[in-house]
Amino acid sequence: ALYKMHLDTFYGTLNFSSTGVNSQLDGSAEQLRPLPQGSAPSKRYFEFDVVDVTSKSPIYPKPDGESLSREVYPCGPGYGMKVQSSTNVKCEACPQNSCRADGAAECEACPPGRYSLTAGATKCLNCEPGLDCAELSAHRRVAAPGWYIL
């Protein structure tokens, strides 16, 4: 559809070649991209590179905001991000009975029937039959109503 389009605009004429290049418009195109993997995690989360893609191929498809946030998330699995300032973050272990798997946006509470005994968990475990997962702790096992622990 763009190949056949010829349109005069305030910015100039839009007239695309068969390769998708607008041959009539003088100017440039820029794309925001994450900082390289080796950059400091908190810097990578708050800053980005501006790349001139006038004569290069842009990243396509451009990642959506959630995918991009996960790509540059500064904390490892089992840790959630706490923003200290507009340029600094602190990574804190997910609390007991929650977890954050690699790629998740934040720590999430374990669903009913699942638990994590320690802070910093990367996954929730299945509750064993007869245990009350909501009351479990690293030092105490609690029986569900109608069950007993010997």
Image: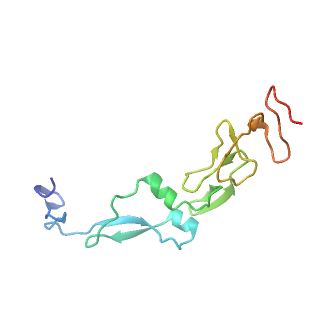
- Image coords of residue 138 (percent x, y): 81, 48
To which quarter of the image does residue 26 belong?
A: bottom left
- Image coords of residue 122 (percent x, y): 65, 53
**Badge count:** 0
Q: Quadrant of the C terminus?
A: top right
Residue lying at 46% horizontally and 58% vertically, measured from the top left: 68
Outermost residue on the right side: it is 150
Q: Is residue 71 left or right of residue 77?
A: left
- Image coords of residue 79 (percent x, y): 65, 56
Q: Is residue 67 left or right of residue 107?
A: left
Q: Is residue 71 left or right of residue 20?
A: right
Residue lying at 62% horizontally and 58% vertically, measured from the top left: 77
Residue lying at 53% horizontally and 72% vertically, measured from the top left: 39
To which quarter of the image does residue 92 belong?
A: bottom right
To which quarter of the image does residue 113 belong?
A: top right
Compared with 75, 116 (above or below) is above
- Image coords of residue 131 (percent x, y): 78, 36
Outermost residue on the top side: it is 146
